[in-house]
Amino acid sequence: MTFTVERQEGGVAVLSLSPEASRNTFNPDNFGPMVIEIESLMLDATCRAVVLTGNGKFFSAGGPVDEFAEAIHDGTIAKVVSEMTKSLHSLILKMRASDTVFIAAINGATAGGGLGLALATDYRICSEEAKIAAAFFALGISPDGGTTWLLPRLVGSQRAKKFFFNNEVWSADTALGEGAVDEVVTSEELLTRASHIAREWGKWSINSRRSTKQLIDASTSTFFETQLEFERALMISSVQSHDFLEGVTAFLEKREPIFSGLDENE
């Protein structure tokens, strides 16, 4: 089995890759079903947050280099990589725009496209054994998986350039110090902590979750005036929702709000 999905209270789903899929995530037989499942969870109104994690020594070890070798020899390498990156990049775009909160529970090594998948989440927690690498330069290729867009936003453009050009491998503590991940915990605490963050971040309204993710992603690539208009448009939309009524009512009644988790725009 490529992965398992455990549904938890608070609208949390934990998707755990099998050890084989963690080692070879982007083999089509592994990644195809995984993409379908994640997209299904994003469409499920009862699922507010998804925890992604691996098994064994790897969170996600990146592309199947042995299969790349075969594809080079039979002349299909361009097709193989085109299909792989198309699938990964499409998933990452959907994750970034979704109201679903994504938490990466990085249990072990992550590299290449697996690093892009981790960086595309909204919150990253590492076990003490985790390692983060790019690994593209050692193969003589350029980066993919959104790593050249995502990592500079977290650590700065020059630090990201050094990470790639030096072909660096970061320990969990180094990744935390550089700002690439948000927490480091023991392996025993990893999934418990990830599920807690997933519940806490997933409890807010759909408008708050989705709009804030989109606004922050847009913030460094638009003019300030454009960003203000984007904020204004999303604010106008959100104040017409039932969740806004609930938030205002809860504030006046001095209690915690209970948001519906439903998208009234669909």
Image (tube, rainbow, N blue to C red):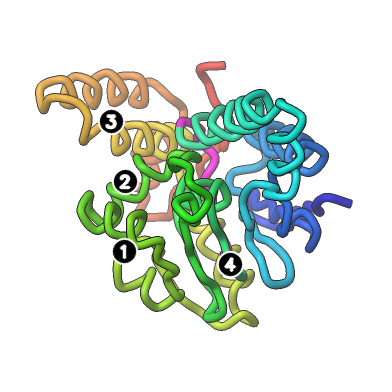
**Counting residues from the N terminus, which is met first, the one under dot 4 or under dot 3?**
4
Q: Examine the residues drawn in magenta and state their main secondary structure.
A: strand
Q: Of circles 2 and 3, which is in front?
A: 3
| Amino acid, disc 2 | Leu
Q: Relative to 266, does residue 182 appear above or below in the rendering?
A: below
Label 4 neighbour load within 10 Å: few <14, some 14-19, many 20+? many
Q: Of circles 4 and 1, which is in front?
A: 4
Q: Secondary structure at mark 1?
A: loop
Magenta region: which residues?
97-106
Q: Which mark is residue 218?
A: 3
> Looking at the image, how many numbered discs can be counted on the residues?
4
Classify residue 160 by image quadrant. bottom left
Q: Secondary structure at mark 2?
A: helix
Front residue of 23 and 118: 23
| Amino acid, disc 3 | Ala
Q: Of circles 4 and 3, which is in front?
A: 4
Answer left or right for 85 relative to 33: left
The image position of residue 108, as x and y in percent, is 61, 70
Q: Which residue is mark 1?
A: 179
Q: Secondary structure at mark 4?
A: strand
Front residue of 208 and 109: 109
**Counting residues from the N terminus, which is met first, the one under dot 4 or under dot 2?**
4
Q: Of circles 4 and 2, which is in front?
A: 4
Q: Of circles 2 and 1, which is in front?
A: 1
The residue at the point 40 percent across, 66 percent down is 168
Q: Of circles 3 and 1, which is in front?
A: 1
Q: Is residue 104 magenta?
A: yes
Q: Is residue 21 magenta?
A: no
The image position of residue 206, as x and y in percent, is 48, 35
Q: Is residue 203 visible?
A: no
Q: In whole angstroms, how far apart are the C-alphas of marks 2 and 3? A: 33 Å
Q: Which residue is mark 2?
A: 252
